[in-house]
Amino acid sequence: MAVNPLKIDLNADLGEGGTQDEALMPLISSANIACGGHAGDTQSMRRTLLLAKQYGVNVGAHPSYPDRAHFGRISMTLSPEALYATLHQQISALKSLCDDLSIKLTHIKPHGALYNDAANNKALGQIIIRVIKAIDPRLKLMILAGSPLVEQAKAAGIEVIEEAFADRSYLADGTLAPRSQPGAVLHDADKMLAQVSAIIERRQLTAITGETIPCSATSLCLHGDNQEALRFAKLIRSYVQQ
């Protein structure tokens, strides 16, 4: 638990087979746990949930397209029924474990390609909203700050957590730079902290091509699979506790 309140929620995607989950957990305030679509199984979900409970970290489900081969990072064309079914199954699997362990599931954060696709695709967004309402309409939806899905979810009565990324570069339209683009993932601590500072203090960030983008994020994501994740998490934690 934090000694001082954080200036902003700090979240990480965990339970994805990485080696830093245990070290990262005490540094964050929210964990998005892979629940079988791109990574994760019953054992990893339970282990990550217990870590989150130990450190008082908020727990969210991190569902994705059912694509373990590509880690959920490639868009898939599924029927609405098939996508609804897999998302419902993934989230329900984690929620069942939460119930068994007396842990509250607080939010849903789509993963990878689904996250990016749903942010700007109303039909996909509606499927996610339907799943949330079916499982527990009190669940919050964590999604890209400023994206069309933010207002779509709010209009449907779903509480939204607007998210920005500490360790990813942005395009001028406010979307994430694709991982295939040089510089899309930040590995330089000074650049990362400059972006964090701009998001928190000025509610803006700078695109990879130099444009200034408004940013209304209330949560910062640090990717657990970034090789710099642990070092970055310590730096951000220190900054947001100042």
Image: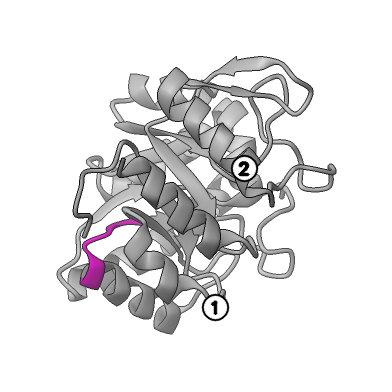
- Give amino acid for label 1: Thr
Residue 99 lies, with reference to residue 182, above or below; the image says below
Q: Are marks 1 and 2 in contact (CB under 8 Å)?
A: no
Q: Nearer the viewer, residue 19 or 63?
A: 19
Residue 148 lies, with reference to residue 187, above or below; the image says above
Q: Position of residue 223 (x, y in %)?
A: 56, 55
What segment carries the magenta color?
A: 54-60
Q: Quadrant of residue 201?
A: top left
Q: Position of residue 163 (x, y in %)?
A: 46, 36
Q: Nearer the viewer, residue 126 or 241?
A: 241
Count residues near mark 1 (Cα–Cα under 10 Å), then give few for <14, some for 14-19, many for 20+. few
* Residue 58 is inside the magenta segment: yes
Q: Is residue 229 visible?
A: yes
For mark 2, what is the residue? 190
For mark 1, what is the residue? 19
**Quarter of the image where the C terminus is located:** top left
